[in-house]
Image (cartoon, helix red, strand yellow):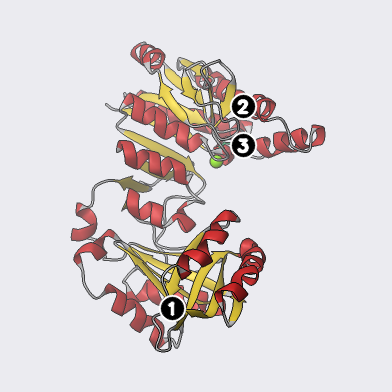
């Protein structure tokens, strides 16, 4: 017998029939003797509907009132799920975030959880009840309703699991786990049985569709075993853990391939190769609130150098304007931009203990005649920037080269 925190997302509770199906599922676990805490999202589409309503009242809806409004979506599903459980003969009790004392700071619409008083939940569990908690919400110290940011129910689930020291936090959703890469691009992509928190964070471009990244960070920090599962299909899903043993021993060195199509490249060519230049280039970018991803600067033969960095595609025009404004002062030859690039990353904790991963990656791309424009590495990740039209070819050949293709 264990204590499980299960979170069901919007599509899993999107209709009355689905809520009943979730109730049956939860009841099954309860029958097997598990202590059950269930976190639910609003019915799918509901939060968007509420956001839309707010927009009809105010151009920039008041954040406090926005939270009062948005939190109602989850309040509907907790009550309905409890009714469905009772209908099956199971005792259950619903709580809003504030009622179960999920205390957050007061940053409305993006609040952070500060503490959870798990005593109430424990009492219910001891009495044999299923506890159903509204995801995505809490209240600040003055009792104002707060919400945790879109997709925040995942974070509620993880936070409750951490507070209750649950055996596992299970995130039920409409996919059956985390994949080695996007199966729409590589049909041979396979579901990972296990992955580490670190890898999951590096795979954010794939993972964020499955899990709120903040929830993964939270789970990693408190070492909450996190499992992603399909709500209505059998299967063991993907377990996200701290444990690295399995990866270094049984699994391939590379766990997955992530990619980001939202990048654009900005190059300053022919700038003087002297101290302070990189700072002069990147400081105004930071001041303009533009996030920089990859940065590459070359050494020079003639005391001038090129500096290239990538930004989000939506920021490219803004970044170019900033560079244009300083390029003369810096003595740059030109400011060049390119938004037809893609970043491809291979990710795996196994890289820590294996040499030759980078060279295998570069060889694979070379064999496909794909030119690498930029390279950046971290302990468990190697990323390259390449021309966008080669994205699928690159992902597919790397997936094969690193032994990730499904075998059956
Ligand atoms: N209902 C909220 C949203 O749609 C929270 C969640 O589903 O996690 O963002
Ligand atoms: Mg969600």
Q: CA distance from mark 3 to mark 1?
A: 58 Å
Label 3 secondary element:
loop
Q: Nearer the viewer, residue 156 or 283?
A: 283
Placement of 69 over or under 364, stated as above or below: above
| Quarter of the rendering containing residue 266 | bottom right
Mark 1 surroundings: few (<14), some (14-19) or many (≥20) residues within 10 A: some
> Considering the numbered disc 2 on the image, is that residue within a helix, a strand or a loop?
helix
Q: How far apart are the two marked residues, 3 and 2, measured between alpha carbons?
A: 16 Å
**Which residue position is annotated with label 2?**
71
User: Quarter of the picture for ligand 1?
Assistant: top right
Direction from residue 266 to residue 258 in the image, left or right: left
Side of 227 where 316 appears, left or right:
right
x and y percent of residue 1 in the render?
A: 27, 26
Q: Nearer the viewer, mark 1 or mark 2?
A: 1
Residue 124, given in percent of the width and then of the height, sits at: 40, 13
Q: Which residue is mark 1?
A: 273
Give me the disc on residue 318.
none
């Amino acid at each position: 017998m264990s204590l499980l925190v299960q979170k069901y997302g919007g599509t899993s509770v999107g209709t009355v029939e689905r809520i009943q199906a979730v109730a049956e599922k939860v009841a099954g676990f309860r029958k097997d003797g598990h202590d059950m805490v269930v976190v639910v999202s609003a019915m799918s589409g509901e939060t968007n509907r509420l956001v839309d309503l707010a927009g009809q009242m105010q151009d920039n809806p008041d954040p406090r009132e926005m939270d009062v409004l948005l939190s109602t979506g989850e309040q509907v599903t907790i009550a309905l799920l409890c009714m469905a459980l009772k209908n099956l003969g199971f005792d259950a009790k619903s709580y809003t975030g504030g009622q179960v004392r999920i205390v957050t700071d007061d940053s409305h619409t993006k609040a952070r959880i500060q503490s959870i008083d798990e005593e109430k939940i424990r009492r219910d569990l001891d009495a044999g009840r299923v506890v159903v908690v509204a995801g995505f919400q809490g209240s600040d110290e003055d009792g104002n309703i707060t919400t945790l940011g879109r997709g925040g129910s995942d974070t509620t689930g993880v936070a409750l699991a951490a507070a209750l020291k649950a055996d596992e936090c299970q995130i039920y959703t409409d996919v059956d786990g985390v994949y080695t890469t996007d199966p729409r691009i590589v049909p041979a992509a396979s579901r990972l049985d296990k992955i580490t928190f670190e890898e999951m964070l590096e795979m954010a471009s794939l993972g964020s569709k499955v899990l709120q990244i903040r929830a993964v960070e939270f789970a990693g920090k408190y070492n909450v075993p996190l499992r992603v599962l399909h709500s209505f299909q059998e299967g063991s899903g993907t377990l996200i853990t701290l444990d690295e043993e399995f990866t270094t021993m049984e699994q391939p060195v590379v766990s997955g391939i992530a990619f980001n199509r939202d990048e654009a490249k900005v190059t300053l060519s022919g700038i003087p190769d002297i101290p302070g230049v990189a700072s002069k280039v990147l400081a105004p970018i930071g001041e303009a609130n533009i996030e920089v991803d990859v940065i590459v600067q070359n050494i020079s033969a003639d005391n001038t150098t090129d500096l290239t960095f990538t930004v989000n595609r939506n920021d490219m025009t803004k970044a170019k304007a900033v560079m244009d404004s300083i390029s003369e002062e810096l003595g740059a030859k030109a400011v060049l931009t390119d938004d037809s690039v893609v970043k491809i990353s291979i990710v795996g904790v196994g890289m820590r203990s294996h040499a030759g991963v980078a060279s295998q990656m570069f060889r694979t791309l070379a064999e496909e005649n794909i030119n690498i424009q930029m390279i950046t590495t971290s302990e468990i990740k190697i990323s390259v920037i390449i021309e966008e039209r080669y994205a699928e070819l690159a992902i597919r050949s790397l997936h094969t080269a690193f032994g990730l293709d499904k075998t059956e």
